[in-house]
Image (cartoon, rainbow, N blue to C red):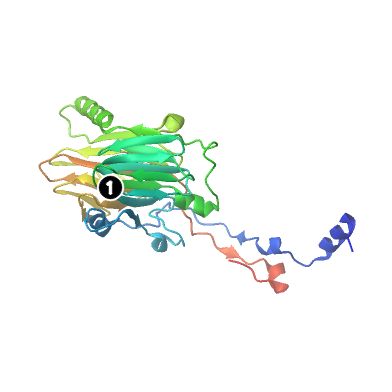
Amino acid sequence: MVMSSIGLRRLASKAPATIQAGRAQYLSKPPVADAESSAQAQVFAEEADRAFDSATKTGLIELDLGEQIGVDYPATTANLLARYLVLREGDEFEFDAQASSVLCYAMKGSGRSFQEDEVIEWTQGDVFLLPGGVTILNESPDGDAVLFVVTDEPLLASLGCTALPFDETQVLSTHFTAKAIAAQLEDLGKQAGESATPVNLRFASSQFEVRGCVAPAICAGIATLEPEVSQSAHCHDVDTISLALECQGAYSMIEGNQIDCVTNAVMLTPACAEHAQHNGGETRMFSFYVQDLGPRIERSWEPRVPAMLEMEGMDIPV
């Protein structure tokens, strides 16, 4: 028997509850958010050692704090996932990140990254951006290489979204060469003159220049600090992933705790944590940083069980 649309409406109107109603959540008003991060300050030294160990095979090494953050997928911060990509000479490695953006810093060696009909030839010190959702083929034919890769996969995972098709993405491939970066830093250093002001060079892609960032959920740049110079204590309202490139004798004070910088390792500084960099060494401190511009996970809301549905014996997801 085929039921008419009028019959279906009548049947639906008599249903005591629906699957859709069971998914509805009712929340009490939260206290004023303190904007604290769910991450904790730490250094990923073991992962860095693996990335530069000659015995490590071609592949990705994740900096995963998903369990600490409270999610069931890999994440370094609420919205970003950082990895080392090890490429052995002559090997190829493909990966497809369900992300809007894939940001890479070439830590060691040289190579090529292919995506659709585009190719970026990179060398040590280069930074480049590719859209996510499309396979990226990486190779290093002339020697071993290491890339530092950051994506916003956790952001899309939290929203239940997939990356846009390649021909619809707003993220365009962008290449910041080591030579151009060095020239910009030299110019900023001349502007700073004799002052002990830290030099901070931020990257922006043409489509996100107005927002002052390189990708929708990512701010990135290079930070330097001269020898025997200390920053003033300050804080940011975003989680910061800092990759130490030159850091002999350098350390951070984060919420009163000293955390030593480790060459090639990542330091995570949580949002709203008071911190300051100190360079006690004899050479300039140099780091590549990435900041999480996406929404932070709030856990202050309290669920209220819908009384009517509870009385009717439905299982209410909380």
Q: How many marks?
A: 1
Of residues 195 and 21, which is closer to you in this image? 21
The quadrant of the picture occupied by the C terminus is bottom right
Quadrant hosting residue 8: bottom right
Q: Position of residue 264 (x, y in %)?
A: 23, 49
Q: Position of residue 11 (x, y in %)?
A: 85, 63
Q: Position of residue 133 (x, y in %)?
A: 49, 45
Q: Which residue is mark 1?
A: 146
Q: Is residue 60 above or below residue 15?
A: above
Q: Position of residue 50 (x, y in %)?
A: 25, 57
Report crowding for label 1: few under 14, some 14 to 19, many 20 or more residues within 10 A (C-alpha): many
Q: Is residue 48 above or below residue 119?
A: below
Task: Answer left or right for 285 relative to 86.
Answer: left
* Residue 237 visible, this orientation: no
| Residue located at (23% from left, 51% from top) | 253
| Residue located at (70% from left, 64% from top) | 19
Q: Residue furthest left?
A: 282
* Residue 62 visible, this orientation: yes
Secondary element under disc 1, as helix, strand or loop, is strand
- Please name the amino acid that badge 1 sits on: Val
| Residue located at (47% from left, 47% from top) | 99
The quadrant of the picture occupied by the N terminus is bottom right
Q: Is residue 88 above or below residue 222?
A: below
Of residues 158 and 312, which is closer to you in this image? 158
Of residues 126 and 63, which is closer to you in this image? 126
